[in-house]
Image: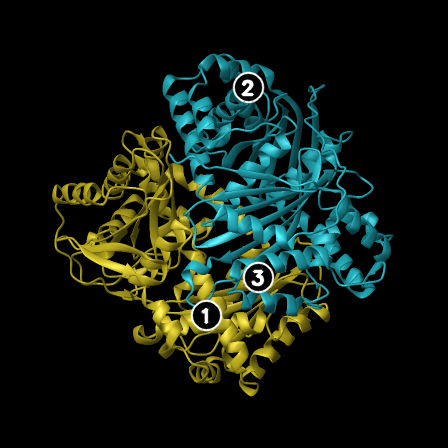
């Protein structure tokens, strides 16, 4: 195993890639009570068109299938896997994002047994026609619950206004119609393609013995055989640089309107060699301009364009990227217009050195704080690893960052035709 | 398991709690001001956190205040109000990076304490009044926040359930205040209310982190001179028996209905049956293995969520479920049956053991978070009983099946609240 030190927090972790291709990260921390483990595949809601294992032709599967598959992984011939974690007092869960599906648990006793269960249940699919049918009612309820949530609708409305063809525009859970068309054969096709160990990572962090854990994982994986897999080809459709629609209005039975302004990224800002820096700088920029200490927040608040705080979103992946600024507001139109103006104005008013230095201190403190949280730490490492990036580099990127770098990025970040505005307004308005 | 120590230092006007641990890269400091909740003062008290965050004497605008926090390496700061039993608590929390991890900084902690002292004791004011402009603006913000609760259906349903269930009790008072009070609040009266809080409330100060007790204590002592005369007696547990069951239905334009049930447990924090109550709640609806989740969601696919949660200082327990509107009768019947099953002792050995493990796991997870540690200890202040984490674990381990059955028979349904679709859900099919 390679020892990877993280000097800024005086800690270290270990990494190795097993023969079957699985990336294993072990991060022992003896001062905490619990252990958190996450087993993740680089497969999310956007991966709908791809070449299945042992096939050379592209296929397209129904919307929401990655999330559906996530639900079904927990059910086995002899019952629900949750049960095995619960019996040991552990809490297990899973999530599906645009680009990954992850299975996880946290536990404070019988950690090794739980890791074994985690590896085994994810590597042993059991889908039947009957179990797939039964799940549809549950997922339908989940979709409807999200449909009632204005913040969720706002977020997806904004994405849908930015992207015309890229599958990021589709709700992660799919639609009630799309999930009813999913079959157990579809699930196997996706499973066999994306759940190969060479497309997956295991991250264990917390209170455990390094050597014992390493041996357990090796023994577990050595017992299983996997066919060698060639690289998975994925297709995301052709997407132009401009936003799809400059404005989107959603009517909902809400009292308080909402608005979100989205900034679509240019593809060349998403290249692997600049992604970490671009991610870090955008995060700092959103903060420098729109946080409560930012250049613009006070004006928005004083003009009554925002009720309390702003919601700042940032997603940069290799096939798509966007930032978004949203709020609950009694004046959604005014908010959208003002924020758009502000964004277009940023180029004209460069950032001051003192503000930049303070923003660097703030970001440094935030990076330290993230290491308080086992889940966040594991997620950061996995997410960047899936994009070919070592998350530890972030400290160095931050320390080397100059004001000129940032002003350079500001000048290229935003164009008018890459901005869209989405609003949630009460019905009848 | 490591035993945490709450090293208490008693001053004439506050109680300092020092809780050293090496778990975190930051230090967390909380000030908790508490007094009995009263209908006539609650809206003013709910407004105070909003006003205080808009500026102090030294940092006269929200932006200046936030810039100071950025300068303290992105210290995170919030003020909020909440209800603990029949008391109203205003909490100031600062989470500041530990200077051990920052080269060339050795007074960060002290600066953090100075900041908290400034914001809590030197608000922006003019003689005997807050700044009227700020107060008016914040009244508007609070008004908007109260009005937007109805858009968060789960939160709204909880609030309405408690409104109706505890109509004639202090616990029924809403901790975020009431719309109809806002008009008459003036900046002078609000300032008086603030002074009353800062001078007369009970005050607890918590410090959690990798700290040296003696050094920390002397820093706090040197900064916190507040000229306080606290005389407040907090409300103790005011446990009531359930009268006849009340049934209420409310209709809105929603897709997913919320069925929430309120019970009286008769058991508060200091009660010797409190550990058994935790286990009962775990068997009933606290976990994914609980009877509610298994039966309402898994067996009958009736709900996306179905869970229970207990309240520690008033002796209440709540069941939450999100269901299709037409499934009301069936869902209610199944929920009530699960309670009956526990009363009748239909609890397997495995259910009991795994629930105890899960409750213990939850406690250990709580004390892996700094705010979790503070909340865990503050329960003891409000609840009037002290345990170490080790003792709590031992008491949960000792709970027997008979203890759980006894608790189940002590828990009585009080109110059934149903938030459903205006059209009965038919149009959604």
Seen in the picture, residue B111 relative to B365 is either above or below; the reply is below
Of tags 1 and 2, the one toward the viewer is 2
Secondary structure, mark 1, is strand
Q: Chain of mark 1?
A: A
Between the residue at mark 1 and the residue at mark 2, the CA separation in whole angstroms equals 53 Å
Q: Is A310 in front, or is B51? A: B51
Residue at image coords 52%, 14%: B343
Residues flagged by tags 3 and 1 on a common chain: no
Which chain is displayed in cyan in the rendered image? B
Q: Does residue A132 appear left or right of residue A297 in this picture?
A: left
Q: Position of residue A363 (x, y in %)?
A: 46, 67
Q: Does residue B188 appear left or right of residue A52 in this picture?
A: right
Residue at image coords 51%, 26%: B278
What is the quadrant of the N terminus of chain B in the image? Answer: top left
Q: Chain of mark 2?
A: B
The answer to whether one can see residue B227 in this image is yes
Q: Chain of mark 3?
A: B
Residue at image coords 76%, 31%: B167
Q: Is B24 in front, or is A310? A: B24
Which of the labelled discs sits on residue B111, or is there none?
3
Q: Residue A408: which quarter of the image?
A: bottom left
The answer to whether one can see residue B178 in this image is no
Q: Mark 1 — residue?
A: A322
Please count the marks in the image: 3
Residues flagged by tags 2 and 3 on a common chain: yes
Between the residue at mark 3 and the residue at mark 1, the CA separation in whole angstroms equals 37 Å
How would you rate the neighbour count of disc 1 (Cα within 10 Å): few for under 14, some for 14-19, many for 20 or more?
many
């Amino acid at each position: 195993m390679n020892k990877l030190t993280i000097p800024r927090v005086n800690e270290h972790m270990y990494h190795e890639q097993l023969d079957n291709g699985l990336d294993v990260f072990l991060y022992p921390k003896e001062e905490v009570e619990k252990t958190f483990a996450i087993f993740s595949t680089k497969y999310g809601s956007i991966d709908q068109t791809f070449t299945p294992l042992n096939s050379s032709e592209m296929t397209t599967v129904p919307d929401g299938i990655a999330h559906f598959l996530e639900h079904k992984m927990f059910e086995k011939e002899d019952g629900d896997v949750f049960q095995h974690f619960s019996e040991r007092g552990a809490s297990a869960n899973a999530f599906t994002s645009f680009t990954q599906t992850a299975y996880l648990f946290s536990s404070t006793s019988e950690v090794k047994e739980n890791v074994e269960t985690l590896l085994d249940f994810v590597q042993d699919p059991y889908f039947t026609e009957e179990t797939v049918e039964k799940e549809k009612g549950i997922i339908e309820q989940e979709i409807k619950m999200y449909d009632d949530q204005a913040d969720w609708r706002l977020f997806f409305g904004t994405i849908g206004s930015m992207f015309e063809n890229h599958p990021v525009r589709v709700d992660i859970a799919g639609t009630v119609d799309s999930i009813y068309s999913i079959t157990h054969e579809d699930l196997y096709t996706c499973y066999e393609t994306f759940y190969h160990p060479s497309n997956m990572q295991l991250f264990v962090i917390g209170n455990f013995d390094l050597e014992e854990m390493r041996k357990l994982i090796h023994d577990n994986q050595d017992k299983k055989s996997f066919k060698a897999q060639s690289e998975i080809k994925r297709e995301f459709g052709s997407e132009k640089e401009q936003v799809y629609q400059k404005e989107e209005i959603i009517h909902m039975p809400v009292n308080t309107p909402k608005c979100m302004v989205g900034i679509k990224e240019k593809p060349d800002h998403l290249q692997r060699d600049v992604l970490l820096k671009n991610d870090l700088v955008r995060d700092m920029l959103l903060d420098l301009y729109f946080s409560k200490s930012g250049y613009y927040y006070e004006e928005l608040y004083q003009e009554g364009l925002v009720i309390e705080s702003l919601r700042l979103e940032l997603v940069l992946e290799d096939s798509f990227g966007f930032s978004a600024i949203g709020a609950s507001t009694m004046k959604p139109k005014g908010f959208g217009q003002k924020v758009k103006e502000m964004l277009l104005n940023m180029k004209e008013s460069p950032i001051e050195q003192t503000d930049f230095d303070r923003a660097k201190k703030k970001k440094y403190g935030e990076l330290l704080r993230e290491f308080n949280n086992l889940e966040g730490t594991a997620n950061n490492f996995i997410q960047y690893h899936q994009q070919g990036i070592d998350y530890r580099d972030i400290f160095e990127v931050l320390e080397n960052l100059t004001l000129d770098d940032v002003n350079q990025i500001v000048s290229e970040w935003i164009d008018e035709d890459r901005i869209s505005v989405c609003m949630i307004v009460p019905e009848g308005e | 398991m490591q035993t945490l120590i709450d090293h208490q230092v008693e001053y004439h006007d506050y109680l300092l709690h020092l809780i050293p641990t090496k778990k975190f890269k930051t230090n967390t400091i909380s000030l908790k001001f508490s007094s009995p909740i009263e209908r006539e003062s609650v809206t003013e008290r709910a407004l105070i956190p909003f006003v205080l965050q808009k500026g102090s004497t030294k940092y006269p605008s929200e932006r200046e205040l936030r810039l100071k926090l950025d300068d303290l390496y992105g210290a995170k700061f919030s003020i909020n109000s909440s209800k603990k039993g029949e008391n109203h608590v205003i909490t100031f929390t600062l989470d500041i990076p530990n200077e051990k991890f920052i080269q060339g900084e050795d007074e960060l902690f002290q600066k953090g304490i100075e900041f908290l002292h400034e914001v809590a004791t030197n608000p922006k004011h003019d003689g005997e009044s807050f700044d009227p402009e700020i107060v008016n603006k914040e009244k508007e913000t609070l008004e908007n926040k109260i009005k937007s609760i109805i858009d968060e259906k789960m939160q709204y349903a909880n609030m309405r359930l408690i409104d109706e269930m505890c109509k004639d009790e202090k616990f029924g008072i809403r901790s975020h205040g009431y719309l109809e009070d806002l008009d008459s609040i003036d900046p002078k009266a609000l300032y008086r209310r603030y002074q009353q809080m800062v001078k007369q409330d009970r005050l607890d100060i918590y410090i959690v982190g990798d700290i040296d007790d003696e050094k920390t204590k002397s820093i706090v002592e040197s900064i916190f001179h507040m000229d306080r005369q606290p005389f407040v007696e907090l409300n103790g547990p005011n446990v009531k028996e359930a009268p006849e069951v009340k049934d209420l239905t409310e209709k809105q334009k929603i897709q997913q209905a919320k069925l929430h049930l309120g019970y009286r447990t008769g058991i508060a924090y200091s009660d010797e049956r409190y550990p058994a109550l935790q286990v009962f709640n775990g068997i009933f609806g606290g976990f994914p293995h609980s009877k509610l989740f298994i039966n309402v969601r898994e067996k009958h696919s009736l709900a996306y969520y179905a869970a229970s949660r207990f309240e520690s200082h008033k002796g209440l327990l709540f069941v939450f479920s999100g269901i299709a509107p037409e499934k009301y009768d069936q869902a209610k019947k199944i929920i009530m049956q699960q309670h009956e099953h526990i009363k009748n002792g239909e609890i397997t050995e495995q259910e009991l053991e795994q629930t105890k493990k899960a409750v213990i796991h939850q406690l250990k997870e709580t004390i892996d978070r700094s705010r979790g540690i503070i909340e865990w200890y503050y329960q003891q202040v409000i609840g009037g009983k002290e345990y170490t984490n080790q003792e709590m674990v031992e008491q949960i381990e000792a709970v027997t099946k008979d203890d759980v059955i006894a608790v189940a028979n002590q828990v009585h349904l009080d109110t059934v609240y149903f938030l459903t679709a205006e059209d009965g859900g038919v149009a959604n099919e």
